[in-house]
């Protein structure tokens, strides 16, 4: 897809990956609809993008994608602009906690924001997307959707749901003009990662990608009409192993179970 003059909605636009993605998309000539719950941060990002010298138009809609009212506001703004060509479901939350200790409300929030919100927003925007000659829904998942990792039980479940949602919806819409795409980053250096997560990653020797790298890969996937990609090595290998030989991945993770539990429970 040529992104020039395409109207693209990005949820979670003011986050680390989101802001990097918006900068990259504007450089491609895209018109952006920025969404998050923080109006001040959205306005700051919109001002930065507008003053960058790139040609894409930028609008903002401060709304909670996890609420029906918020989603209605997002859909209305997209309608006002003549509909969108691309939806990037990026907004998400991350909670690193041993499951038995996790707050039930946090479990509900994680599932609502990470899984239910993109499903319901996508459903509401399907008529706009279907009206376009070509359109794309890109769901940002996680490597953890394919590798059940201790300490991230709820997060893994939510992102696994996003992966299955993408696969099923893509097959359902295969005879339409809408392409449904999924990208799974590994650990990324954003503020979603707490000090405990960063400390654990250092102890385990886990690498983290930069937001700019992930953003560039998302743009490339949109441009090349890619359907599925996983980021990071050896994480890609672990995804394949977990699908074919899950016992191998289980043993590798269990070697560090005590350390992971220490950080998740602290």
Image (spheres, rainbow, N blue to C red):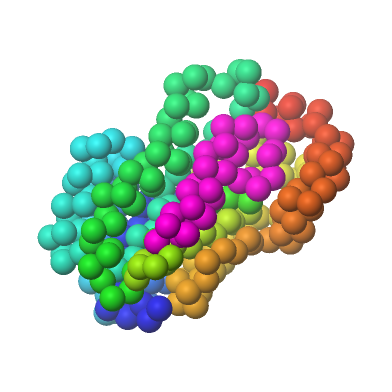
Q: Residue at x 64, y 61 (%)?
A: 231
Q: Write down the quadrant of residue 2 in the picture.
A: bottom left
Decide if residue 194 is on the left or right side of residue 177. Answer: right
Work out whether residue 119 or residue 256 is closer to the camera in this orientation and state it: 119
Q: Which quarter of the rendering shows the C terminus?
A: top right
On screen, 55 above or below 255? Answer: below
Q: In this view of the protein, can residue 136 be seen by the observer?
A: no
Q: Residue at x 29, y 68 (%)?
A: 85
172 magenta-colored: yes
Q: Write down the quadrant of residue 44 in the picture.
A: bottom left
Give the x, y percent position of residue 121: 31, 48
Give the x, y percent position of residue 79: 16, 59
Q: How many marks?
A: 0
Decide if residue 231 is on the left or right side of residue 177. Answer: right
The magenta-colored residue range is 144-173
Give the x, y percent position of residue 130: 27, 65
Q: Write down the quadrant of residue 102 in the picture.
A: top right
Give the x, y percent position of residue 160: 57, 44
Instruction: Identify the main secondary structure in magenta.
Output: helix
152 magenta-colored: yes
Decide if residue 230 is on the left or right side of residue 216. Answer: right
Q: In this view of the protein, can residue 4 be seen by the observer?
A: yes
On screen, 60 above or below 28? Answer: above
Q: Residue at x 74, y 27 (%)?
A: 261
On screen, 264 above or below 200? Answer: above
Q: Residue at x 74, y 50 (%)?
A: 243
Q: Which quarter of the rendering shows the N terminus?
A: bottom left
């Amino acid at each position: 897809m040529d992104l020039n003059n395409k109207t693209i909605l990005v949820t979670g636009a003011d986050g680390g990956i989101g802001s990097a993605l918006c900068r990259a998309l504007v450089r491609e000539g895209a018109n952006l609809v920025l969404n998050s719950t923080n109006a001040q941060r959205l306005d700051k990002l919109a001002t930065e993008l507008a003053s960058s010298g790139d040609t894409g138009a930028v609008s903002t809609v401060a709304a909670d994608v996890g609420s029906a009212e918020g989603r209605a506001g997002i859909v209305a703004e997209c309608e006002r602009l003549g509909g969108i060509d691309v939806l990037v479901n990026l907004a998400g939350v991350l909670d690193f906690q041993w499951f038995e200790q996790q707050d039930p409300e946090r479990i509900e929030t994680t599932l609502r924001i990470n899984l239910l919100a993109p499903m319901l927003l996508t459903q509401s925007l399907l008529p706009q997307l279907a009206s376009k000659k070509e359109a794309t829904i890109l769901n940002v998942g996680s490597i953890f959707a394919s590798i059940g990792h201790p300490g991230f039980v709820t997060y893994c479940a939510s992102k696994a749901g996003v992966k299955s949602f993408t696969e099923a919806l893509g097959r359902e819409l295969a005879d339409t003009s809408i392409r449904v795409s999924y990208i799974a980053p590994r650990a990324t250096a954003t503020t979603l990662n707490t000090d405990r997560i960063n400390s654990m990653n250092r102890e385990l020797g886990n690498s983290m990608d930069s937001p700019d790298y992930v953003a560039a890969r998302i743009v490339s996937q949109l441009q090349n009409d890619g359907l599925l990609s996983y980021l990071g090595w050896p994480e890609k290998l672990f995804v394949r192993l977990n699908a074919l030989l899950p016992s191998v991945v289980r043993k590798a993770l269990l070697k560090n179970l005590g350390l992971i539990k220490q950080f998740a429970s602290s």
